Image (cartoon, coloured by chain):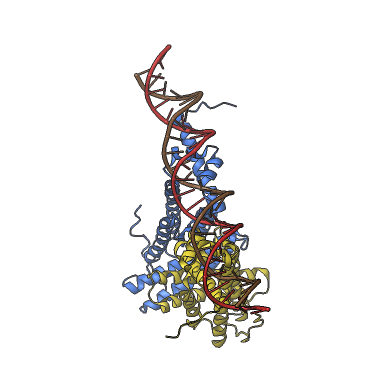
Chain colours: A blue, B yellow, C brown, D red
Amino acid sequence: MTSTPLSRSEAKDLTRRRLIRAALAILDEEGEAGLTTVKVARAAGIAQSSFYVHFKDMQDLLRVLAEEGGRRLRHSMREARRAAREAPGDLERHRDTFRIPLEAICRHPELLRIQLRARHDPSSSLRGFATETAAAYREHHATDLAALGYTADDEHDRRRLEMIADGINAATNALAIGHLEGRYPDLDEAADILVALSRGALRLLRSGAGRDEGPRPPEPADPAPRD
Amino acid sequence: MTSTPLSRSEAKDLTRRRLIRAALAILDEEGEAGLTTVKVARAAGIAQSSFYVHFKDMQDLLRVLAEEGGRRLRHSMREARRAAREAPGDLERHRDTFRIPLEAICRHPELLRIQLRARHDPSSSLRGFATETAAAYREHHATDLAALGYTADDEHDRRRLEMIADGINAATNALAIGHLEGRYPDLDEAADILVALSRGALRLLRSGAGRDEGPRPPEPADPAPRD
DNA sequence: AATTTCACCGATAGTACTATCGGTGAAAAT
DNA sequence: ATTTTCACCGATAGTACTATCGGTGAAATT
């Protein structure tokens, strides 16, 4: 095997990545309370004091972790939006629209677990990140519904869209976690449930608008795909 | 005003209750990480060392808190079940069925927050309690659906019921929290969304059963109201 | 009235973690 | 070849919390 004569900066960067990876694992396995400089450093194979060569303090590391999580998150949101665009118009019939976020969660379950945990923990350094993430998901989903042609004219309608998006997102998370816990082995079944829940909500929007009854043909392009 | 010459045991019990109340407040405001004997004792107006007169250690106090929470929980579940029984048969038309759990949550939001936090935190002493609570809600709801006459014959159907219950519960929690955060001012609106989500899911059950199409008249009595 | 009980107190030893220090050797720059 | 840089080390002071100790006074018991 070829030995690798690492340059100094390469070695440092590698150690930094080991620290981040170790922190993520500990955070998932033991929670934020179990995340200490001692454990992270030992898991990365360096002395506790050397932790501070790479990060100002634990807050700093958590900030980096949140940024890293945000990156992956935006990626999976783009992916979901792209997939929704490829199955334009008819949200109801495509379980894939719901399979994609389910699979994204199952690919990195630790991100959801950490987020759910931090979301309601006032002492968590990641709370801001978790709250922003939840809001982003909610508004992303609500915007998707609006792009499908469902009314969001007045404040009341817009709020209804957000509540539906909020509810569906929560259900998605719950089913993904149930899958990870082994209760729901088949992701397709989970996606079907989500499709069914959505159907009910969308029917409400149509009848609630009180103008026409049939499914409204939406403008297929989504208006503002910023970022 | 009549002064109260407290007996010794009365005074002790009062202090104990002050400790529990203080712990619940701190737990809600600062999270499990911020819950220390120092803070709880000070908030209850006694010395830190006197904490151990009432509880073996912090674990012991948390155990008591979980039991207390379980008591309130079972109470609100009984209430919901009773209300569902009073509006027999037609789950779809009664937004009250969903108003009741929403209101129960808003009456004691700290219980839900603590539960959601502990649910995915491996280091939490309350994790077992949170997991059991979530499972109880899920199965309670699934049983209600089954009692309404929706099929739960084979493993597949039963799992489908559980997934729907899981999803609706998650949506209920999400909307209640949105209400508490001020995003959804009107609980009736939230209940309407939940009714709509349920409608979609129940339609799935009917068509999925593949036997008859109309709403199945359920046996009105629920079979096993143990506890 | 005398004695016992016990809820509460202050003090403190023990534990765990943070963050800084000066020292070291090898890589990098000169 | 010499000097500088710096990632890493061990040691340690500082901080926060836990849990136990003996002491105290008032309630309860005798």
In the rendered view, does B162 fall on the left or right side of A170?
Answer: right
* Residue positioned 36% across, 52% down in the render: A227
Residue B4 or residue B91, whichever sits in front:
B4
Q: Position of residue B135 (x, y in %)?
A: 60, 68
Residue A81 place in picture, x, y as percent: 42, 57
Pick the residue in front: B195 or B181. B181
Q: Is residue A52 above or below residue C25?
A: below
Quarter of the view holding residue A161: bottom left
Q: Is residue C26 left or right of residue B136?
A: left
Image coordinates for residue B183, horizontal then vertical, percent: 38, 70
| Vertical comparison of A59 with C2: above or below | above
One can see residue A92 in this view: no
Residue B101 in the image, given as x and y percentages of width and height: 50, 77
Q: Say which of A170 and B179 sits in front.
A: B179
Residue extending furthest toward the left: A154
The answer to whether residue B22 is visible is: yes
Horizontal side of residue A186 vs A148, given as left or right: right
Q: Quadrant of the N terminus of chain A?
A: top right
Is residue A6 placed above or below B24 in the rendered structure?
A: above
How many numbered marks, from 0 up?
Answer: 0
Q: Report the residue at 54% width, 87% height from top.
A: B87
The quarter of the picture where residue B164 lies is bottom right
